[in-house]
């Protein structure tokens, strides 16, 4: 120990830094009680649960330390390891002015996103923020390094590295866009919310009286708007879900996908799994469970547009993306929401080099004035555009029906999939036989019935239907090379695994241009 006397100025600095450190180490008793009443974890406990023990390195801990009551300026940023893989963490502290943003809050977030861009590291956004501090608006809102630069960097990160958002509380006003720019939004039911204007503001500006849950609650966003991807019960489940999602993804767009020990499926896929009568609904999850490794399917937007199932799974330990029609919900017909859901998921898989498997059992896109007014052509074109432009290995499996533009949207032969595989239950046509016969022969059917009676009408319809079904016979489609393989369900997993291995060297070029113009 030095015999020199302590410099009082140095000692003063030590004491002030120590005090600032302790102020951000734990919440006040009042703040801790509030977190407990909300069933929330403290920000540093959230980070400790996310990262490998002892791996967190924090930046900017003393931001705004000269101001009273603003430890770390309300946001904790830094880097660490998730299952030995490096990541960036940006976590709001709701005990500091409700996690609101000041000038230094924004600067810390901007710096963290710049690090992610520079080093191409995944970003975990642990969001619980009331939005901007109006008192700091000039310093944090309009400038080149203001809040807008966060969104700019998020867009630059999109498709370069995984971005995962755990939404534990509010994400208000402009800050609501942070979750929307990430790849996965996990929302805690009862606590999480997203909204551009609060219920109070909505009442003031547009005269609408609405609750926070109705305006932007977790369940609303996961079932109605589709902004939320996964609904969870609490903070712990949110973080565990986020870690699980990362386990399917590469560190960045250049890196290889992670591999795991192969496992057998949880259920056997057999002919009994799939009803032969196309009008009989069944749960497509039963087919998925027969293809992917045991308990490996991570479904996205399960509560939103359930007529289409999308998610990541593993086959023999390798990540694959699944896009599947579910006849148990709305007959598996494609709507605007299901088209949007598919397009975003396909873009994600294409960004991170994840092969895609389409399980088609689709009557086509919904028709009628309501969906036309809602822009179903525009939304459907978005899905078709995503399928067409994806350059990862793609496999179209026709489980049962694939009618009209539904065949195109599900990666059909015209979109250069690596293979189109049909099960014996498959049917491919512009439309189903009943609709086709009625469309072509409506006048003739009416005339036969008027002249010869109902029995003659039914006989005429049956004959025309037989002609139509012969025209689209499965063997004929295989003979004409529309199909690459017709296979029994029991053999499908092995067939796909073999084809996935051979498709690894697929050419990833699509079209030389500056960029496409998605029909959004």
Image: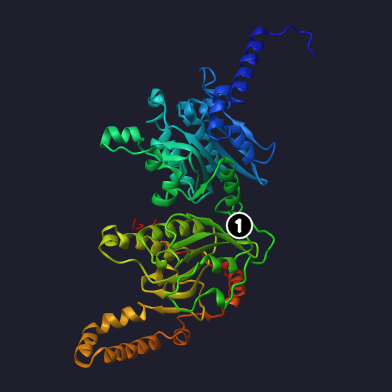
Depth check: 96 or 496 in front? 96
Q: Is residue 376 left or right of residue 260?
A: left
Q: Is residue 504 above or below residue 110?
A: below
Q: Is residue 514 above or below residue 507?
A: above
Rendering coords of residue 476 (x, y %): 44, 87
Q: Is residue 308 left or right of residue 500?
A: left
The residue that label 1 is drawn on is 257
Rendering coords of residue 59 (x, y %): 59, 31
Rendering coords of residue 371 (x, y %): 29, 61
Depth check: 320 or 370 in front? 370
Does any portion of residue 99 appear in the rendered image? Answer: yes
Colouring of the image: rainbow
For numbered disc 1, what is the local secondary structure? loop
Where does the C terminus fall, quadrant-wise? bottom left
Q: Residue at x 22, y 93 (%)?
A: 452
Rendering coords of residue 409 (x, y %): 41, 67
Depth check: 67 or 27 in front? 27
Q: Residue at x 29, y 59 (%)?
A: 375
Does any portion of residue 251 appear in the rendered image? Answer: no
Quarter of the rendering containing residue 412? bottom left
Q: Is residue 155 left or right of residue 7?
A: left
Q: Residue at x 36, y 73 (%)?
A: 404
Looking at the image, the residue that sits furthest to the front is 454
Q: Is residue 514 left or right of residue 33?
A: left
How packed is label 1: few (under 14 Cα within 10 Å), some, or many (20 or more)?
Answer: some
Q: Total of numbered circles in the picture?
A: 1
Where does the N terminus fall, quadrant-wise? top right
């Amino acid at each position: 120990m030095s015999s020199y006397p302590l410099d009082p100025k140095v000692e003063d600095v030590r004491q002030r830094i120590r005090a600032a450190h302790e102020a951000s180490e734990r919440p006040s008793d009042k703040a801790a009680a509030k977190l407990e009443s909300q069933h929330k974890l403290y920000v540093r406990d959230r980070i400790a649960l996310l990262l490998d023990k002892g791996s967190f390195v924090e930046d900017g801990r003393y931001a705004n330390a000269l101001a009273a009551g603003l430890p770390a300026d309300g946001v904790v940023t830094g880097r660490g390891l998730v299952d030995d893989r490096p990541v960036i963490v940006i976590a709001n502290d709701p005990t500091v002015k409700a996690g609101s943003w000041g000038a230094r809050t924004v600067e810390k977030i901007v710096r963290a996103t710049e690090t992610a861009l520079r080093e191409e590291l995944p970003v975990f956004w642990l969001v619980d923020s009331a939005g901007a501090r109006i008192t700091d608006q000039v310093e944090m809102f309009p400038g080149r390094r203001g809040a807008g630069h966060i969104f700019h960097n998020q867009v630059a990160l999109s498709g370069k590295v995984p971005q995962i958002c755990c939404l534990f509380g509010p994400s208000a006003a402009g800050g609501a866009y942070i979750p929307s720019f990430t790849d996965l939004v996990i929302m805690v039911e009862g606590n999480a919310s997203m909204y551009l204007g609060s219920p109070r503001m909505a009442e003031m500006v547009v005269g609408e009286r609405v609750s926070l849950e109705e305006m932007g609650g977790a369940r609303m966003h996961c079932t109605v708007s589709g902004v939320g991807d996964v609904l969870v019960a609490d903070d712990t489940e949110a973080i565990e879900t986020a870690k699980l999602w990362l386990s399917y993804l590469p560190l960045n767009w250049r890196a290889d996908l992670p591999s795991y020990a192969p496992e057998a499926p949880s259920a056997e896929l057999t002919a009994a799994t799939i009803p032969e009568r196309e009008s009989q609904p069944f749960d497509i999850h039963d087919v998925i469970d027969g293809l992917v490794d045991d308990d490996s399917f991570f479904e996205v937007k399960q509560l939103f547009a359930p007529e289409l199932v999308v998610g990541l799974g593993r086959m023999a330990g390798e990540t694959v993306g699944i896009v599947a029609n579910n006849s148990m919900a709305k007959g598996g017909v494609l709507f605007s929401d299901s088209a949007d859901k598919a397009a975003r998921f396909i873009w994600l898989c294409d960004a991170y080099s994840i092969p895609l498997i389409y399980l088609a059992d689709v009557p086509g896109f919904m028709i009628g004035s309501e969906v036309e007014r809602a822009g179903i052509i525009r939304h459907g074109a978005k899905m078709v555009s995503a399928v067409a432009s994806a350059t990862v290995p793609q496999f179209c499996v026709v489980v049962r029906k694939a009618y009209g533009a539904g065949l195109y949207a599900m990666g059909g032969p015209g979109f250069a999939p690596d293979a189109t595989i049909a099960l014996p239950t498959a049917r491919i046509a512009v439309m189903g036989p009943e609709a086709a016969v009625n469309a072509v022969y409506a006048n003739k059917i009416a005339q036969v019935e008027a002249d010869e009676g109902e029995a003659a009408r039914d006989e005429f319809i049956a004959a025309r239907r037989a002609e139509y079904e012969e025209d689209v016979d499965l063997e004929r489609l295989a003979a004409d090379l529309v199909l690459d393989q017709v296979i029994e369900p029991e053999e499908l997993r092995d067939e796909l695994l073999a084809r996935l291995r051979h498709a690894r060297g697929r050419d990833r070029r699509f079209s030389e241009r500056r960029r496409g113009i998605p029909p959004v």
